[in-house]
Image: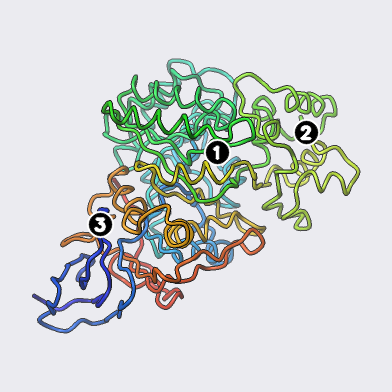
Amino acid sequence: MSGFDLLVRGGLLVDGTGRPGRPADVGVAAGRLTVLAPGEAPRTGAAEVIDAAGRVVSPGFIDVHTHSDGVTLLGPSGGSRLVRASVLQGVTTEICGNCGSSLFPALPERLPAMRAETRITFGGGVGAYADFAGFAAAHARVPRANHLASLVGHGTLRAGVLGPVDRPARPDELRTMCALLDASLAQGAAGLSTGLIYTPGSYAGTGEVVALAAVAARHGKPYVTHLRDEMSRVEEALEEAIEISRRSGAALHVSHHKTAGRYAWGRTERTLPRIAALRAEGMDVTCDVYPYTAGSTALAAMLPPWANDGGLGALTARLGDPAQRDRMRRAIAEGVPGWENTVGNGGWDRISVACAPRHPQAEGRTIADLAASADADPLDMAADLLVAEAGEVTIISHSMVEEDVRRVLAAPYAMIGSDGVPKPGGRPHPRWAGTFPRVLGRYVRELGLLRLEEAVHKMTGMAAARFGLTGRGVIRDGAHADLVVFDPATVADRATFTEPLLPPAGIDAVVSGGRVVVRGGEETGARPGRVLAL
């Protein structure tokens, strides 16, 4: 046996398969792993040794649901603290391009317009790319600590061919969308995602999505969906996703499964048995979940779909028209067929401002509170803020109950995703810095909802299997050298809604691509991460 670049010695090996932990040392050489039998010692020394006595050694965590597509491209001034938050909680692979929104693909003639629209979600100067290869090349020029994979966003496909318009795709347009999707999947994108509550994805009918999901199926890659409704019509929306999967032949993965809003609380008691029954019948369906009762999205998503028809310029014009504001107010009060009405299902008092770059005094306060302070109607307050910020406002929605979160976490087919939205400035949701330690600390150690090995499997091996991350998510001979060393007695999230980027406790070391990127809870400066073509 040759010497190792790194030896992790004396830890409890929890290997990502769900099997019971066992004492074992783990060696790293040339970016690959070797598991040593108990008592076995390397024949020659290791260049570096990590003493893992009293610690758990697990595969690097895989965050299956992020919106981190462009944060590293912002450079040190815009994104370094945000990038670091993911790595410090043990994430060695992020899967972005979720909820129908990716930074690619688009027809070349549509790229300038796409770049103008994507800055709202992903930060200034990021732009959009013609295909996965262009996206990967852009990231390859910017060193990163952990790895990145990306889905193809249906909303991006639609905007990249049709523009942000509310109409069905013509047959020729759908063929073009399918061809763009096919090319990016062939280049290594991880699957197809939809965000059917978000425009322009919400303008598509079921048949359009079936045609695209069939392309993913031909590549053996999953259909990953933010359901058309996660609130009062969540069961109907789940059935649409099932229909898309069955008609297309694509495996189904339900993003951040939840039953949100007061009219849907408790419905996981029906959605989860439905998924379990489908699996028992042989259907390939899974989901992910984050361990919080609050979500985060764009403030513009609180408005009815027609308000966003035509893109940012059209939205801004409508928000400046008192008659259009009244129409939006009525839509929220009365509902719109087929629309997930977040405010109508909860209220403006559950919507707080996470990031409003020109109005930091609004951050951390609810729309209802801001409106009351200004003696204004909440819709007018939201509209004024969107106009003043050119649409660039993110919010946090306190819309779920703990019982539903626990039920989804405990489901044997549910894996872990942060749904992190790492935008510069403001008060982002703490899940970007705390998701994985929170599962281990609160739901494993404190509440006993999950066994340690079960939780690690959800964060590693299960996720790798779903997204085709061959050689990742498990610790075995020859696997990629992505590891986390953590203290099971102290691991915990420290990020809060007030201080959302506080690093966790108990994450001692993180190894990515065979190199130590976190030691003693601090980044080392190593940047071995890369974009993964799957």
In the rendered image, residue 21, in percent from the top left (x then y), is placed at 25, 63
Cβ–Cβ under 8 Å for marks 1 and 2? no
Number of the front mark, 3 or 1: 3
Could you tell me which quadrant the C terminus lies in? Answer: top left
The label on residue 534 is none
In the rendered image, residue 245, in percent from the top left (x then y), is placed at 36, 25
Q: Residue at x 53, y 47 (%)?
A: 127
403 sits left or right of 53 in the view: right
Cβ–Cβ under 8 Å for marks 3 and 1? no
- Cα distance, mark 3 to mark 2? 50 Å
> Who is closer to the viewer here, 165 or 403?
403
Q: Mark 2 points at which residue?
A: 319
| Kind of residue sitting beneath label 2 | Leu
Q: How is the image coloured?
A: rainbow
Category of crowding for the residue at label 3, using alpha-carbon neighbours closer than 10 angstroms: few (below 14), some (14–19), many (at least 20): many
Q: List the single residue furthest toward the top.
A: 171
230 sits left or right of 207 in the view: right
The label on residue 474 is 3
Could you tell me which quadrant the N terminus lies in? Answer: bottom left
Q: Total number of numbered labels?
A: 3
User: Mark 2 or mark 1, which is nearer the start of the sequence?
Assistant: 1
Residue 221 position by quadrant: top left
- Cα distance, mark 3 to mark 1? 38 Å
Number of the front mark, 1 or 2: 2
User: Mark 2 or mark 3, which is nearer the start of the sequence?
Assistant: 2
Placement of 92 over or under 99, stated as above or below: below
Residue 93 position by quadrant: bottom left
Q: Name the residue under label 1.
A: 114
| Kind of residue sitting beneath label 3 | Val
